[in-house]
Image (spheres, rainbow, N blue to C red):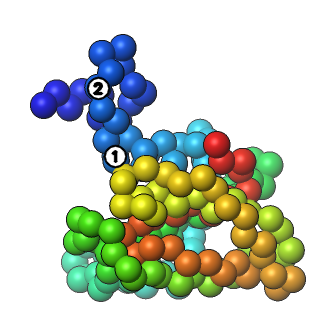
Amino acid sequence: PNQSYWMINPTPEGWELFPSYHALRLLLSTTERGWRVVRVEPWARNDWDPLVRDQPEKEIAAYVGADEQLTLVGLDTRGRLLNTKSDGTASYSIGALPPSTRLNLAIWNANGDGRTSPATEVMTSAAGVARFEVPLHAAFALTTVDVD
């Protein structure tokens, strides 16, 4: 099949949008050009050194905008070989966030269909900790940006 339009908007011909389109759209709708990538602790050698075997774990990347907008995207690599919806979940507890702040949690592939589910709200604690769960076969964006 023609792969030219797998990751861009629908074409006039009505070609199907694939999961890669929806995953990329989630990232691009929760960050903007010029945002800084910020380090997420813990930062171990297997996170950056291609010569060190990386164990299955939760992976998170963080981005900060000029007006202190914040987006974290992540997934649990234990779900990397899943081709179907699983019953397992990954629990996240992320600190060093703005205290008592409403964040939007958007999940890609939550239903196993390769689409992004409508965002839900997550409140950080007074200590700046967000706690939430994501299906093992899914990825997420936790953000201060309004997600459509």
Q: Residue at x 80, y 65 (%)?
A: 102
Decide: is 14 above or below 75: above
Q: Let me know if residue 48 appears in the view.
A: no
Image spot of residue 107 (x, y percent): 52, 60
Decide: is 84 above or below 54: above
- Type of residue at label 2? Trp
Q: Is residue 23 left or right of residue 71?
A: left
Q: Is residue 53 left or right of residue 10?
A: left
Q: Let me know if residue 87 appears in the view.
A: yes
| Number of the front mark, 2 or 1 | 2
| Residue 94 falls in image quadrant | bottom right
In the rendering, which numbered label is found on residue 20? 1
Gap in Å between the C-alphas at discs 2 and 1?
14 Å
Q: Quadrant of the C terminus?
A: top right
Q: Is residue 13 left or right of residue 41?
A: left
In the depicted view, which residue is nearer to us: 108 or 145? Answer: 108
Query: Badge 2 is on which residue?
Result: 15
